[in-house]
Amino acid sequence: MINGSLAQGPFYVPLATTEGALLASYNRGAKACRESDAITIVTLQEGVQRTPTFKFKNVIELGKFVSWVLDHTETFSTLTRETSNYAILNDIGINIEGNILILRFEFTSGGASGQNMVTICSDRICQYILENCPIKPVFWTIEGNFSGDKKISPLNTRVRGKKVTAEIVLKKEVIKSVLKTTPALLHEQWRICVSGAKKAGVVGGGMHPSNGLAALFIACGQDVACTGEASVAVTRMEITEDNDIYFAITMSNLIVGTVGGGTSFPTQRECLELLDCYGAGKSGKFAEIAIAVCLAGELSILAAMSSGQFTAAHQTLGR
Amino acid sequence: MINGSLAQGPFYVPLATTEGALLASYNRGAKACRESDAITIVTLQEGVQRTPTFKFKNVIELGKFVSWVLDHTETFSTLTRETSNYAILNDIGINIEGNILILRFEFTSGGASGQNMVTICSDRICQYILENCPIKPVFWTIEGNFSGDKKISPLNTRVRGKKVTAEIVLKKEVIKSVLKTTPALLHEQWRICVSGAKKAGVVGGGMHPSNGLAALFIACGQDVACTGEASVAVTRMEITEDNDIYFAITMSNLIVGTVGGGTSFPTQRECLELLDCYGAGKSGKFAEIAIAVCLAGELSILAAMSSGQFTAAHQTLGR
Amino acid sequence: MINGSLAQGPFYVPLATTEGALLASYNRGAKACRESDAITIVTLQEGVQRTPTFKFKNVIELGKFVSWVLDHTETFSTLTRETSNYAILNDIGINIEGNILILRFEFTSGGASGQNMVTICSDRICQYILENCPIKPVFWTIEGNFSGDKKISPLNTRVRGKKVTAEIVLKKEVIKSVLKTTPALLHEQWRICVSGAKKAGVVGGGMHPSNGLAALFIACGQDVACTGEASVAVTRMEITEDNDIYFAITMSNLIVGTVGGGTSFPTQRECLELLDCYGAGKSGKFAEIAIAVCLAGELSILAAMSSGQFTAAHQTLGR
Amino acid sequence: MINGSLAQGPFYVPLATTEGALLASYNRGAKACRESDAITIVTLQEGVQRTPTFKFKNVIELGKFVSWVLDHTETFSTLTRETSNYAILNDIGINIEGNILILRFEFTSGGASGQNMVTICSDRICQYILENCPIKPVFWTIEGNFSGDKKISPLNTRVRGKKVTAEIVLKKEVIKSVLKTTPALLHEQWRICVSGAKKAGVVGGGMHPSNGLAALFIACGQDVACTGEASVAVTRMEITEDNDIYFAITMSNLIVGTVGGGTSFPTQRECLELLDCYGAGKSGKFAEIAIAVCLAGELSILAAMSSGQFTAAHQTLGR
């Protein structure tokens, strides 16, 4: 049961996995949410980046080039509109280090995940720059490995795809009846796990969002190679004054699409349609469903660990 | 063509993906290697971790508990042997912060990827500790989120699964004929991309190992949710005195299995058998094949970008 | 000899240290630069942040609060002008996670390093918000530990204080006569050191900018507790076509002041005056001198290590 | 009042700073501790590293070199003893990436901070290896920038200098009377600040340990350029069942010395003698005092912020 800005109501979510314990665990988490309250979800930000990089004879040349680029940003927007029906150029970031310039083009991409779309648009813009700007770089490349594509970095905590936050208040009765633990134990488990992640230097601090996302991505024709970056999650749990549990999860790299890529294969399309998430303009809704799945999975694994059921679950439930 | 410590000779590698450009790119990288020299691969380290965490009344109690634990490490090895035919306990790490103790149990796991196996063994050891140690923790959990499971952290650069390094010298003629670029352009592209990753704070600095790994993991019944952690890679390129290219890739989290999990499903098993990688004792060989795939993929994408073919490839080759 | 946007010409720089080897080393690096070319320096960005943080009953309340805040940004600029003669509010960043909102106020601070100035201005703005906004937070604090103050984080690579980049081309003859090494050895040493820093996960990748900065900060009345954050540096070295060395250093957290704080004590003021850097409007110039010092120090230590002189220097030159 | 493994009893700690608010704040924190309980401190680990780095023709050559090195570790211990009266070689780490080998030599250094001592010992060992090992590297350097010297990295959370943990239970009455706040507000402030640091990607998560350390390091002749690395701190706060506050701080890079370097200058020596920390064998005690100072400072600033006094303090107390 989701109360999102785009996704509203109850959803049956298809997951493709070979691990039985995982499905049971996500189900249990979803049940605990359902019996407590709706999950409130807000989409905060959206953007897919490409980061073409240019090298110059020296920093003086670079400076002149940047000035020219900043004078032509409207042209870049026009070129983007000419190149794609969906892409919109929203922001241009400037990163300078010695004689190297990284331009960060940030687009929205309609319902597509957008990696290819923004490559093609950025290439068009770069070709225009190279032809028209009087200052010529000594080397350039369409991607300087600064966009976060297929990688995890602290930069990812800004946005890549959709940045979404979700929260729920879990009732203490439900924590006992469904999650088989107590608010105090659940909170202690979360607190220790977030502290462990921090000590390990993990970017984000979830438990296992990649499990749910991998299963959802395979079922719904997403790019499975993005599972790593997409699963960066910040979680937070608190005991409320009523001794219930407040739980929030924020994911900044939900790079998903509901059109293009693997979404049009028959089974994958069927899965998306089951969620009413197939086609243009549906990727925001799909991202909100994805974070709800992860929220349920985080709660369930924390509950299992807090009450010592985690090992038992893995021994009982086969694949 | 691989000259590894475990994998030797030529291999045909099955990849499951919906992206045509990706297959073409990996093929091209593999061809460039094949025509240059064998890829030399060395497996450096092996280990799967579970990190049970204990909390005490205060740091004094914790100190007594640690002393007791360090006096019983041989018992823990015995318990491990009794619990699993494959798991071997190789190392126990101690991490203390105030009144919280994280024990890092590190195992080898035969041919299995081992996450469940080490959970069960660690649980057995913890149960023994809790029953027999006179000092009782106020809270404990089988996993304090410090093991790196399903997550990317700088700790991952130590080892999780297999740590493997691979190198090759690419001939300048092959760089021209197969990769359609020059040693100087290829090197410049790598240099800019590694610098971009560093600026973004990426852990590791590869281009897109997750593409190849996701495709290989799906085909061969691996845990796709581990794609993120597994794809952490350090790459290095240099121009040799002969104007050839030295290229090395090191991956520290190749958490793969050739027995258990999804490996026994018919198609997946077939794919593993094609590589002679099905069954106990084959996971090291499979890891060496996996890194060879990634090496080929890194070279190909860098070559494409260095010569401006990257965007064109994505426009021409559909899915 | 500096060719900066603000600092121009030759400078004698006062350093306070107890280590003889360090002074000799920085002198040597400066000499190598002087005999090669001027150091070109460009100031890229400027800003000091305070990050007040607000917590709400739920994310819906938070959303209404953010809307109100975004409608009153002009008032915040006015309040800033009323509170300080120097501070200018340039940017407001929004960071949301569940029911927690971090506002990032970014100011310029005239010639002061500005930490206290921005605290006072931010407090004034927050008081205004709390009094006037109909939505009330359940908790708020003037600083949510997100500003980077006295800490090192990847966020620091954006800007804190001044972001400055500097470059020089070192002549091969000077590398031989002054630095007692060769372009090839120097480049190999840099390449290995930047790779080592990357493997260790260091933010930035300099060798020892903190040595020069600590000595300069003590001499010139800067906040020595900021040495850590200020010394984050990205360095890059390349061999040019003429077999000379291109070297660039970029520092994004040069948080320095030429008015206020410890700058008005007699000795410290004298040191600043020696550089013509005392008083309002001089902090940009001082930052450019600081990065020139670090550039010289990096070159010298890399040269010493590349030719095996490093240990010898520490044995010969006492403190 | 300290209950440490090495430091016992009450101490008057000299701090050199130009900021009045800072002294007042640290005093208040110390008073709150004194009136609540002793600070319990445990030194967990000790070690100073040097990381010589070797490059080979290929990874096969490297493998043979490593074998030879591992067969001669006892000789390295002997060489260390011959070179220094204080240094003891405790551990040798192996890090391989392609054809590059980083050896991490870890020493204890008596009462000295030890950076120069371990450089000289490592150099002696490396010279021995280079003369005697039949496999010759194509390049080597005494330091591959992997030791953490003068830098902050996640590796620092292991140990550099001393790793020390400290804890205290603060009484609710004292929190009210001395710190002018409540357990609930103090805890909320800490919780938000640790979450902010995590979102920013800060290594460690203290508020301002560098303030206290910089002042202590200047007063006591320490290497001020190490303030950044030394101030990495993990803090943790909890409300106890009695509604008191449990607070712990763990610092893993307290690289300090009580002999050599700047410790023998008259004023600095006097400051160390005031703490009975001058001379060989006293650096452990000094590290325990240093962490107690930081603990007091963290508590005080968190208290001030939680009750809105932070800005006021900076406006009232001049420098």
Image (cartoon, coloured by chain):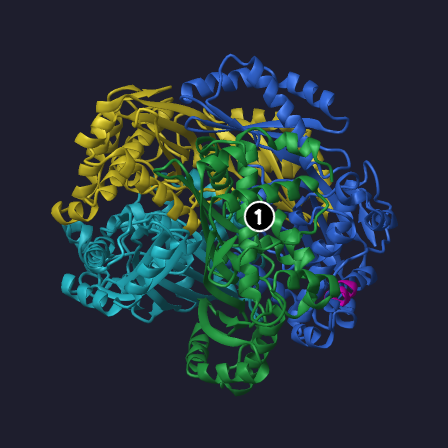
Chain colours: A blue, B green, C yellow, D cyan
Please identify the quadrant where the N terminus of chain D is shown: bottom left
Q: Nearer the viewer, residue B90 or A93?
A: B90
Q: Nearer the viewer, residue B73 or A300?
A: B73
Look at label 1 and name its amino acid.
Pro
Residue found 25% across the figure and 32% down from its top:
C268
Q: Nearer the viewer, residue C87 or D146?
A: D146
Q: Is residue D192 magenta?
A: no
Badge 1 element: helix
Task: Decide if residue D292 is on the left or right side of residue B219.
Answer: left
| Residue on which the image places disc 1 | B209
Q: Position of residue C103 (x, y in %)?
A: 59, 38
Q: Which residues are magenta?
A: A22-28
Residue found 71% across the figure and 54% down from its top:
A213
Q: Nearer the viewer, residue C33 or D305?
A: C33
Residue D53 visible in rendering: yes
Neighbour tally class for label 1: few under 14, some 14-19, many 20 plus, Cα within 10 Å: many
Please identify the quadrant where the C terminus of chain D is shown: top left
Residue found 51% across the figure and 48% down from its top:
B203
Task: Decide if residue B26 is on the left or right side of residue C191.
Answer: right
Q: Position of residue A139 (x, y in %)?
A: 48, 25
Q: Chain of mark 1?
A: B
Q: Is residue D242 above or below residue A251?
A: below
Residue B208 quadrant: top right
Residue A234 visible in rendering: no
